[in-house]
Amino acid sequence: MLSDKVKLTAKEILEKDFKTSIKGYNKDEVDQFLDLIIKDYETFHQEIEKLQQENLRLRKQLENIQNKGMEPGATSIGTGNTNYDILKRLSNLEKHVFGRKLFD
């Protein structure tokens, strides 16, 4: 995933050794700065991992919802028809039990 595109790991940044010269950078400043980069890099990596896991979970959840929607009678139209059929049957049953005079 994203780890394939990232060029450096926190370990590689930590182990980076700069060449020194007479007028080179202050090694302590470079080390402190690299420490900050490493902390940020690890934070970004953890956040990316968390987001990838959440993305995977949500995709599976969406897939489950879509699969349930494909089942017969699971659509809102099917439910409406089922309710209508039930009401019609109840009406017919009441007519038979109580007689047609109540409904005329």
Image: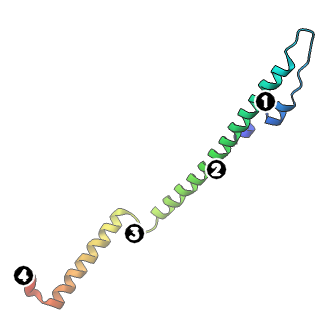
Which residue is at a point 9% across and 84% down the rendered structure image?
A: 102
Q: Quarter holding the C terminus? A: bottom left
- Quadrant assignment, res 73: bottom left
Closer to the camera: disc 1 or disc 2? 1
What amino acid is found at the position of numbered circle 3 in the picture? Gly
Mark 1, residue position: 35
Disc 3 secondary structure class: loop
Residue linked to disc 4: 104
- Chain-order first, disc 3 or disc 4: 3
Which residue is pictured at 68% across the width and 37% down the height? 44
- Which of labels 2 and 4 is toward the front? 2
- Give how far across and how far down residue 63 sits, in percent: 54, 57
Q: Which residue is mark 2?
A: 53
**What residue is disc 3 on?**
73
SS under mark 1: helix
Label 2 crowd bin: few (<14), some (14–19), many (20+), radius 10 Å: few
> Sequence-wise, which precedes: disc 3 or disc 2?
2
Residue 11 percent coordinates (x, y): 83, 36
Q: Are marks 3 and 1 in contact (CB under 8 Å)?
A: no
